[in-house]
Amino acid sequence: MVTVTYDIITVGGGIAGSSLAKAMAEQGAKVLVLERDSVFRDRVRGEAIMPWGTAEAKELGIYDCIMASGGRDLPWWDGYQGSERTSHRDLTATTTPKEAVTAFYHPTVQECLMQAAADAGAEIRRGVRVVGVQTDGSPKVVAEVDGCDTEFRARLVVGADGRDTPFRRWAGFDVQRDPGHTLVAGLLLDDVPVADDTSHAWLNPELGLWVLIFPQGGGRVRGYVCYGEAAGFRLTGEEDVPRFIEESIKAGMPESCYANAKPSGPLATFDGAASWVDHPYRNGIALIGAAGGAPDPTWGQGLSLTLRDVRVLRDALLQHNDWEGAGNAYAEERDRYYKVLHDVELWETDLLMETGQKADARRAKAFAAWREDRTRQLDVLLSGPLPAMDENTKRRFFGEE
Ligand SMILES: Cc1cc2nc3c(=O)[nH]c(=O)nc-3n(C[C@H](O)[C@H](O)[C@H](O)COP(=O)(O)OP(=O)(O)OC[C@H]3O[C@@H](n4cnc5c(N)ncnc54)[C@H](O)[C@@H]3O)c2cc1C
């Protein structure tokens, strides 16, 4: 068996793996990306980076790459409750980072970032599936290359293989998971006549429905329907497209939006329950992106979180000669911002996705308090994690003090 040694190996060449490979290869590190897929396809993933993630993309120097592969700025955020438009917000003026949502088609951006990593000097191996990892001494991954198990060693191995993959367990991390609550269905559609500089969000708390549309230009949009697990169905495959449209209209979306819509990708539904690892570094192995923590897709935070992970890990590796120290510094910082995001997501889910009289009363109380003082509402999901939060932040959010 041949063993080749690198500074960094990323297991997975998605947005997390390729962005880190690019960032570190640019700094002279010898980087290898091991990516299972030879061709990227629509896996129904995130295609809208929230404003705080747009700022991270710019900081990492990948924003131009996203734009060059068909990305677009969505400076406006229109919110609706049922059929009533409740907000028309200029994100570039009103969020802390003063940035827009960045919308794009995921497979094209994956391709572009992988090329950018290669251009920066990273070695890319595609069609290579990692099948094991060892953490004694310098970390080592085993991958299937042309039907043979091949070992690769590195000073640092970075798990960037997405949600629900076995790598993090092989590496000895305990995976935490929230109880299930929401499901998220996603579909790419053509011929949808909505303003294409705007993210459109229909919230119908009485039905526990939350529908989002992120335009990609030329009438193409990525649509999501978020709904309670208790509904007892999962929208999957061509035969469920009419139901996807029906649920969107039930949330309050005008019928005209989807009157001529044609699906142009698969329809799939995912569990909303977040899964994550506390302190995502040990023994020469770091986890980033969805492998480190996959938030509830309902709230659209995964890509921003991924880009923050990449930036924080990059900076730690550049600041510390001792990469054990760098890995631990990254993991401590990651725990902090992940907790803020996770807490806010759980509060939003409690407040906005629960149905029934008790939930209606709770919402009425919170919304009244928000109208009096907008800072109670928190803008974490668009503006990014606050440095710290406490019980008082939570009580203020729910209008309980
Ligand atoms: C339905 C849904 C909607 C979402 N909506 C949003 C949104 O609106 N906004 C947002 O910010 N986020 C959203 N997200 C989250 C977002 O998609 C993820 O945060 C993001 O894709 C994470 O990127 P990643 O590179 O960590 O993982 P992935 O995108 O999953 O990439 C992992 C890569 O690793 C490769 N891989 C896996 N196993 C192996 C192996 N054994 N060997 C080698 N390679 C391997 C895979 O082929 C893949 O290329 C959504 C997620 C879902 C499921």
Image: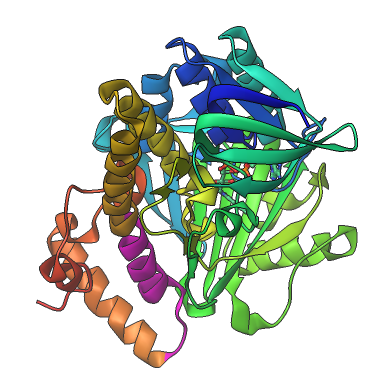
User: Horizontal and vertical percent for residue 144?
Assistant: 81, 39
Residue appearing at x 31%, y 58% in the figure: 339
Q: Where residue 389 appears, x then y in whole percent?
A: 17, 59
Q: In the image, what residue occupies the spot 43% across and 52% down?
A: 79
- The answer to whether residue 258 is left or right of residue 205 is right
Q: Which quadrant of the structure image shows residue 241?
A: bottom right
Residue 105 in view, yes or no: no
Label the magenta part by its dominant secondary structure.
helix
In this image, 280 relative to 134: left or right?
left
- Is 74 left or right of 266, judged from the image as shown? left
Magenta highlight on residue 347: yes
State the residue at coordinates (55%, 71%). 182
Q: Which residues are magenta?
A: 341-356
Instruction: Say which of 92 and 54 sits in front.
Output: 54
**Quarter of the rendered image showing ligand 1:** top right
- Answer with the quarter of the image where residue 384 lies: top left
Residue 124 in the image: x percent, y percent? Answer: 69, 21
Q: Nearer the viewer, residue 319 or 234?
A: 319
Q: Relative to 217, say whether 184 is above or below.
A: below
Question: Height in image: 83 above or below 123?
Answer: below
The residue at 29%/82% (across/down) is 362
Split into 4 quadrants, where in the image is the N terminus?
Answer: top right
